[in-house]
Image (tube, coloured by chain):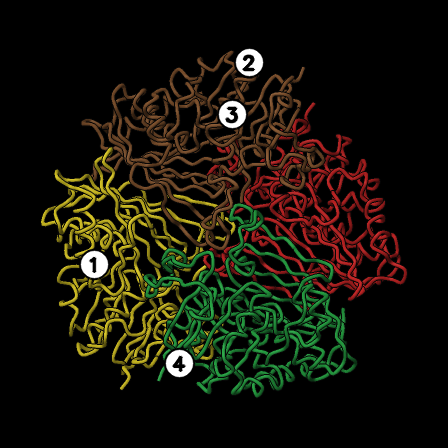
Chain colours: A yellow, B green, C red, D brown
Amino acid sequence: MAVRAAVAGASGYAGGEILRLLAGHPGVEIGALTGNSNAGQRLGALQPHLAPLADRVLEPTSAETLAGHDVVFLALPHGQSAAVAEQLGDEVLVVDCGADFRLRDAQDWERFYGTPHAGTWPYGLPELPGARDALRGSRRVAVPGCYPTTVSLALFPAFAAGLVEPDVVVVAASGTSGAGKALKPHLLGSEVMGSMSPYGVGGVHRHIPEMVQNLSAVAGERVTVSFTPTLAPMPRGILATCTARARPGLTAGRLREAYGKALAAEPFVRLLPEGQWPSTAAVYGSNTVLLQVAYDEAANRVIAVGALDNLTKGTAGGAVQSMNIALGIPEETGLPVTGVAP
Amino acid sequence: MAVRAAVAGASGYAGGEILRLLAGHPGVEIGALTGNSNAGQRLGALQPHLAPLADRVLEPTSAETLAGHDVVFLALPHGQSAAVAEQLGDEVLVVDCGADFRLRDAQDWERFYGTPHAGTWPYGLPELPGARDALRGSRRVAVPGCYPTTVSLALFPAFAAGLVEPDVVVVAASGTSGAGKALKPHLLGSEVMGSMSPYGVGGVHRHIPEMVQNLSAVAGERVTVSFTPTLAPMPRGILATCTARARPGLTAGRLREAYGKALAAEPFVRLLPEGQWPSTAAVYGSNTVLLQVAYDEAANRVIAVGALDNLTKGTAGGAVQSMNIALGIPEETGLPVTGVAP
Amino acid sequence: MAVRAAVAGASGYAGGEILRLLAGHPGVEIGALTGNSNAGQRLGALQPHLAPLADRVLEPTSAETLAGHDVVFLALPHGQSAAVAEQLGDEVLVVDCGADFRLRDAQDWERFYGTPHAGTWPYGLPELPGARDALRGSRRVAVPGCYPTTVSLALFPAFAAGLVEPDVVVVAASGTSGAGKALKPHLLGSEVMGSMSPYGVGGVHRHIPEMVQNLSAVAGERVTVSFTPTLAPMPRGILATCTARARPGLTAGRLREAYGKALAAEPFVRLLPEGQWPSTAAVYGSNTVLLQVAYDEAANRVIAVGALDNLTKGTAGGAVQSMNIALGIPEETGLPVTGVAP
Amino acid sequence: MAVRAAVAGASGYAGGEILRLLAGHPGVEIGALTGNSNAGQRLGALQPHLAPLADRVLEPTSAETLAGHDVVFLALPHGQSAAVAEQLGDEVLVVDCGADFRLRDAQDWERFYGTPHAGTWPYGLPELPGARDALRGSRRVAVPGCYPTTVSLALFPAFAAGLVEPDVVVVAASGTSGAGKALKPHLLGSEVMGSMSPYGVGGVHRHIPEMVQNLSAVAGERVTVSFTPTLAPMPRGILATCTARARPGLTAGRLREAYGKALAAEPFVRLLPEGQWPSTAAVYGSNTVLLQVAYDEAANRVIAVGALDNLTKGTAGGAVQSMNIALGIPEETGLPVTGVAP
């Protein structure tokens, strides 16, 4: 029997991607679609690519419209999830794509988000040590940010094997959908096409404490992260280049072995053959993460590069993957593993 | 029990898209993957987006490697299909994505392709009057060209209802994958990005006789087509703007009614609500065709615009859809109807 | 001695391009830069590519700030130019990049713009018969729309020579800067990249009466224009595919001869060698228009294709070219003729 | 009296950009244009954006065709410059855009290029300490690589002021023109658009020894560089994100002061106002370099970001700038400082 799912924030990019995946999920029946400013509109006018759902009409986001579902996906602006979640019963699975419940440290939250900390929910990155078990049977899931998903998957094997120093430099490129549908001049096509630009430089990006939290937990010591995100002229995709100084005794062989061992059983993370590097095009629209790692002897640094689709594995795919685990549905159900390329 | 399918030309864009769709088709087991210059290579090195098939190795395209399959998809350069098809038994379903068997008129073939005509197979555009029946049980299918698919679907309802003059002007934009993986300077990213350019102008494009054939059959009279294709800075997608002079008595209402009636039962073709126009982004990676039509009274012309993904509905999706019909599998099986957007 | 120029609307795309050209114009000194919502801001924050003007500050658009200049460029929303122009003396050269003074027929204006007609100024497309003379010494110039510039240049030689029927079909692709800096969802990079889409379909685009006006004047009879604009995934550039039925006796030779004769003396319009077709990339940032023409015998239609940069020759370059003529400065001064490619 | 310049390798991207700049340089007369496989072709067929030079015909690259010029620009594949330069008299200014004469250390050359070291010429990055003087009156110039230009300009002020540790991590994104016109599958538009991918990862990129050479000279000690280049979906532009650990006592103020002082007099390098970050779009087609710098206290790292156009300041613009200095022409002559945007 299908579970009945509602999506709050169905007019945005995250909400649209959740719907694209749920529409192909054999175990899910799509219930209420809600929005705020867009309530009352046909979904087809807002998300024309969701052809089978074109005639569905958005309802307002409220306890009433979200009631009576087995699963509720929240794709809302940061800070709005707690109030909505409170109104939903403990038996309802709430999958929050916002940041509200990702961080364990209230001070980190307040420093980077400037509001009171709402709490901490099981973290929807099942590939991290212990995370999958914490998701089983849970009725609350905090879906990770797209950058932390990429960076954590690219580096945790190195930290788990104690191969690198706890001082990481990450430069990542993201497609524009990562910034959402906000009407800002720098997101106009005329500005974006042909342009690479950094933003949130200097340790201020809100995804930093999440990366620090994930990597420190695996490393067993405090990891610092220098993180520079850049906006790339493409709609989707994240490419994260992550480097850390090698610890004594590291060899290319031991590095590769550590990654192979840590990822062998993962259905959505693939360590590429030696010499082949990830590209965002190869994971376009899929829940697959492509990884490659190398050791630069001259600089004595490990370079790990990860590519994923920020809307699929980086948001909606991770959310559906976590839903599957929480509800005891086979983890890979309804999740594409082939990219749409070229 | 799954049918066993081979793909000849698995290293190209059409072959890769066929594999992307077959990998998600519940009724198909993927057999031999063949190539010529690329025989012996891992598919993962050539088509990194096909993660689940990454370790499959390409075999040479030959009667031996293609033997023992229920279906063989041919994604070969024009002129190579006949020789391969001859070697395959009549009980094997051969789905040819090349041009060889599309045209009924041998003179048209020779004028545009310059080689002897190989013959004519049932035409894989089931939405055209009579085409679906001809495909049922057939063991040979000629998959249409991507432009003829778009233009024929955009205009046949107007001709079926006798609403327009048999003198059509079409200007279409195509993503670069329509030109295949050929290493030509004008297809380099540096040349393509930021550029719109026409090609094959002046009645010389090889898809013209195919459009003329399809529209004339529906119109019951000879239709002429002025066709100008343009190369657009995007990997996928065709947007075809098709116009024809209105016949006396045409009204916007009668026009819309004719399209509604002709397309109502089609699972993959959607006439958009009035005022909403198609975009290629909305059909990215899907088998859906989006159409809209308008009547310009001042110019007394009908304008029909169609958008599809040249690799999905325009090639591989049309091929799989035809396979489903030929084999009696439900027509929509394994074919995505939602686009990957944004 | 340099002429002193002010630019009203300096924060927009047209205003920015005027400034890019004036900054390289040896005969011009840049005076006041004005805006409305952006008054008080550094230009560098709004137009970071105009490095030498980065520290200039925008003033409000008013009679005071615009006073004391020899030339005033108006890059304002449609309908705002008349009020500003009235306040400027007759001795000041006013170059209006808006639509307000382009049309001669008040009814056309009212039908397409819905406001009272402000009047008609000399038309800034010097390549049209008679236009250059009308601009000499003028103190008012109406800069043409970007589409009418492209289409008029692509077709006027055929009409001047009486080679085609007065019934034209045009499909054009434009870069997103043609839509300006307006914050609209469909102009977001996430929506635009990878997408071709039509807009203003069915005879409603405001540039139609302007094309009809220009071509009818050359043809000596009423020309109808079926015009479909499309939005292309690039920041700049227009590619217009223009077709008209051939009149009896037309040959490819006579067609080419007519174009050669009409354009031979033009510094900014180039008829390409036979077989070479225009691309928008080749005119990126330049004031050059590239044209090619062909005769499709089977369809009995002439196809003329023109490419230009909508912000340069399509707006700001045409404005500066007209300024040069009006002020008796050599016409090519300060206008790039090489594109920035690849 | 104008100097007469020849360009060897006029059919490539670097050669084309040199010609775009020389065509607008008041002190230069363009002489021979040479190529190898393309000798005999019209330039217009190979570089359609160079409208004024369209009818020039390429000659073979030889001592004869290059003789009789005051300046010869070499835009040849690595390893071919020495043989050509030898045949040119010492009084001829030879500006080499290849790598052959960039490195001082023969072992570095042999390790990264695998051929005997041809020698070392004055280095065409005038902004580096001492470089401008070395170029004055020189008749040989080695134009830097595009990445070393960006990274050296972004970091030398920090090293000159002794503010950072000699252990640098750089991740840079480049437009596809940086890879030249080579016909390689991964450079096809279909592959590039929508895709970010790394290449030459792990300390193997040939620009590394050049960065190490430049930064070590300024630092006065050996600097190590971990460099990861990525290919971005745009034709032009480099965005380099450069980080180094801060030395004790560093403050944001001292950092900014050091950059301001080092760059104040440079005509082509601009330190942006605090809070504004560079973008490649803002320098499209210009010789301007935009820089911004920040100090991340939590990670104790300096982040310097530089943006330039790889074909202009990164190659051809740097070449023309060096020519100006060598010949005693005002340094800024013929070099655009405004980008073509949007």
Residue type marked 3 = Ala
User: Foreground: D129 or B249?
Assistant: D129
Identify which residue, A281 or D333, lies in the foreground: A281
- Residue B245 falls in image quadrant: bottom right
Q: In the displayed structure, does residue B250 sit left or right of residue D334?
A: right
Instruction: Residue B120: tell me if it is visible.
Output: yes
Task: Determine whether label 4 and label 3 are within 8 Å by CB.
Answer: no
Q: Which residue is mark 4?
A: B3
Residue B227 position in % (x across, y down): 69, 64
Q: Position of residue A277 (x, y in %)?
A: 33, 50
How many neighbours does mark 4 have within 10 angstroms: few (below 14), some (14-19), or many (20 or more)? some
Residue type, mark 1 in image: Leu
Q: Secondary structure at mark 1?
A: helix
Q: To which chain does the residue with label 4 belong?
A: B
Q: CA distance from mark 4 to mark 2?
A: 76 Å
**Residue under numbered circle 3:** D319
Chain of residue at mark 2:
D
Q: Quadrant of residue A32?
A: bottom left
Mark 2, residue position? D328
- Asked whether the viewer can see residue A47, the reply is no
Circle 1 is placed at which residue position?
Answer: A263
As drawn, C27 above or below D48: above
Cβ–Cβ under 8 Å for marks 4 and 1: no
Where's the C terminus of chain C, which quadrant? top right
Please report the residue visible at 23 percent of the width from the left and 69 percent of the height from the top. A322
Alpha-carbon span between mark 3 and mark 1: 48 Å
Same chain check for tags 4 and 1: no
